[in-house]
Amino acid sequence: MPLTSPERISIVEVAPRDGLQAEDRTLSTDVKLELLDRLAESGHTAIEATSFVSAKAVPQLADAERLMKLLKPRAGVRYTALVPNQTGLERALACGVREIAVFASASESYSRKNLNQSRDAAIAGYEPVIARAKAAGVRVRGYLSMVVADPWDGPTPAPLVADLSRRLLDFGCDEISLGDTIGVGTPGEVTALLGALRRGDVPIAKVAFHFHDTYGQALANVLAAMAEGILTFDASVGGIGGSPFAKMAGGNLATEDLVWMCRGIGIETGVDLDKLVATSRWLGERLGRELPAHVSRAMSIPRS
Ligand code: MG
């Protein structure tokens, strides 16, 4: 157990967006609404619901408008929608979205491949988008991907991540989520990155982490980040997700794996493990495959 283990952490559930966009099978709007309902029922209070990127780029989430219009507000639950630009923001606002996320890359190559823009141009382009969202009273989350390394560029310098994080916060982001998109990081890199963020005057209370389990390091990285004061973590039920633009990216940290670990340490998450595992199994049936989460698979093994 880390020396500074918190009493409570917040989980941002990303399966309905980050997870589903990577799946071969596209779920119907009704099934997505049921997924959102089940996640809220299991205790989630922050759920990334969909994305207003172009339907051509991400056909799995082409029903964003319909979904957000049909999704009933729920007391105590925040639903986020990803927006790529001003047009996406206007579409989201028209559907009553109250929280958006913008996504940038800490590495140059991934920015060019994923966003078709240089890293600095992409980040600068968000300034008016974030300003417009804040003026509309909308909460803004900023994603920064490839914060440990990039498959084409190699290791990402930690001071650069601190600099880019500060830039997004200065634009008005309420929170930034730092993603180890290819899942290569270990507690060594995470601790070093946290040191760079502190030296770079990045407010740690506004930083969340988004780990991928590609190399099996996600939970160890969560513990390392917790020990440095991070209290918000992204996770995906069933461990679904990756990146359609970075094929070597493995699945997201599975929410049930994170909740299982927190329960063992005595860290409150507000999420009911049994309901979450039931949702994970239900989702696996809808997606037609066994999902990678360790805990749901282990809990499926009959005890004799
Ligand atoms: Mg992810």
Image (cartoon, rainbow, N blue to C red):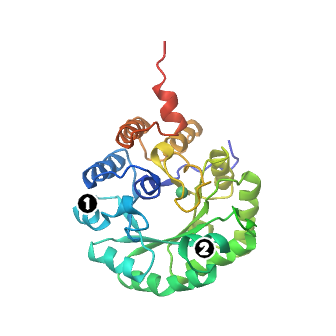
Q: CA distance from mark 1 to mark 2?
A: 31 Å
Q: Residues within 10 Å of mark 1 (few under 14, many from 20)?
A: some
Q: Is residue 276 visible?
A: yes
Picture coordinates of residue 280, whole percent (x, y): 41, 40
Q: Residue at x 76, y 61 (%)?
A: 192
- Say if 90 sits above or below 148 in the image: below
> Which is closer to the viewer, label 1 or label 2?
2
Q: Quadrant of ligand 1?
A: bottom right
Three-letter code for the amino acid on which mark 1 is drawn: Leu
Q: Residue at x 26, y 60 (%)?
A: 71
Q: Is residue 137 visible?
A: no
Looking at the rendered image, the quarter that the N terminus falls into is: top right
The mark nearer the N terminus, 1 or 2, is 1
Q: Residue at x 38, y 58 (%)?
A: 60
Asked which secondary structure carries label 2, the reply is: helix
* Marker count (numbered): 2
Picture coordinates of residue 142, whole percent (x, y): 52, 71
Which quarter of the figure has residue 74? bottom left
Asked which secondary structure carries label 1, the reply is: loop
Three-letter code for the amino acid on which mark 2 is drawn: Ser
Task: State yes or no: Cβ of the residue under disc 1 lies below 8 Å from any atom of ligand 1.
Answer: no
Q: Residue at x 63, y 48 (%)?
A: 214
**Nearest the eye: 235 or 2:** 235
What residue is shown with label 1?
71
Q: Residues within 10 Å of mark 2 (few under 14, many from 20)?
A: many
Quick check: 115 left or right of 95?
A: right
Please tell me the numbered disc located at residue 111: 2
Q: Residue furthest top?
A: 304
**Nearest the eye: 134 or 89:** 89
- Say if 235 sits above or below 114 in the image: above
